[in-house]
Amino acid sequence: MRAWIFGAVDARAEDILFYKRLKFVADDLVICADGGYNAASLIGIIPAIVIGDMDSVRGKIPDSINRIVHPRGKDKTDMHLCIDYAIAQGCTEIILLCAFGGRIDHSLGSIFSLRYIAEQGAEGMLLSKKSKVFVVRDKAAISRGEYTKISLLPLTDTAEGVTTTGLQYPLENATLYQTQNLGISNAFCGGSATVEITGGVLLVVCEIDV
């Protein structure tokens, strides 16, 4: 099962248009992290549940929508609580929307949560109009789509045995260090690429070059 989680980052008009083009299906689980309900309501999506301390929701959530209200003084962010909920429901794919571009701390937290999702045995992705971000722990095939740039960044101190195909600057059994920038700003050679690692956790950032 796939979950879509709306974060509380304010969505611009171009973001709303992008989200409206996404393909939500009947079996998808839509979750709003507190103020993520604002964006979901703008695109006409009715979430299955809203989770959080409800400090950033604008307007009234209809009584027909389920919610889990947490106190403001808590140990996990609203986004993390939503991820835990999705995993508990058996979701194996979790896509984060409106989860990057606001506060730096929350944006970084969203990126790091992709590793957490992977460690729970699910696939995670952070998706925006201009980028998609996900982690690789072994091997991934990546479709170019609209994206022109791709960067590889270790989420652990190192990512070992990094081998790529289909990229302008290929790597073969390389070690990438978190404190260096070797993997930043590569490019696709064709319609797809592969990334394989033997150790560590690697963050893959695909972006539209503007």
Image (cartoon, rainbow, N blue to C red):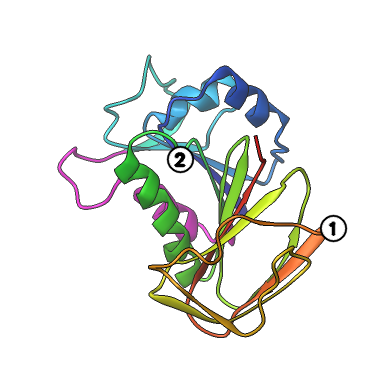
Kindly identify the residue that appears in the image at 42 percent across and 64 percent down: 116
| Label 2 vs 1, first from the N-terminus | 2
Question: Which segment did they paint magenta?
Answer: 69-93
- Which residue occupies the foreground of this view, 89 or 55? 55
Secondary element at tag 1: loop
Kindly identify the residue that appears in the image at 69 percent across and 67 percent down: 169
Q: Residue furthest top?
A: 59
Tell me residue 99's x, y (percent): 45, 40
Res 78 label: none
Residue 68's image quarter?
Answer: top left
**Which quadrant is home to the C terminus?**
top right
- Which residue occupies the foreground of this view, 66 or 7? 7
Kindly identify the residue that appears in the image at 56 percent across and 28 percent down: 46
Residue located beneath label 2 in the image? 99
Near mark 2 (Cα within 10 A), the count class, few <14, some 14-19 or many ≥20, is: many
Kindly identify the residue that appears in the image at 49 percent across and 35 percent down: 98
Near mark 1 (Cα within 10 A), the count class, few <14, some 14-19 or many ≥20, is: few
Tell me residue 102's x, y (percent): 38, 33
Amino acid at dot 1: Gly
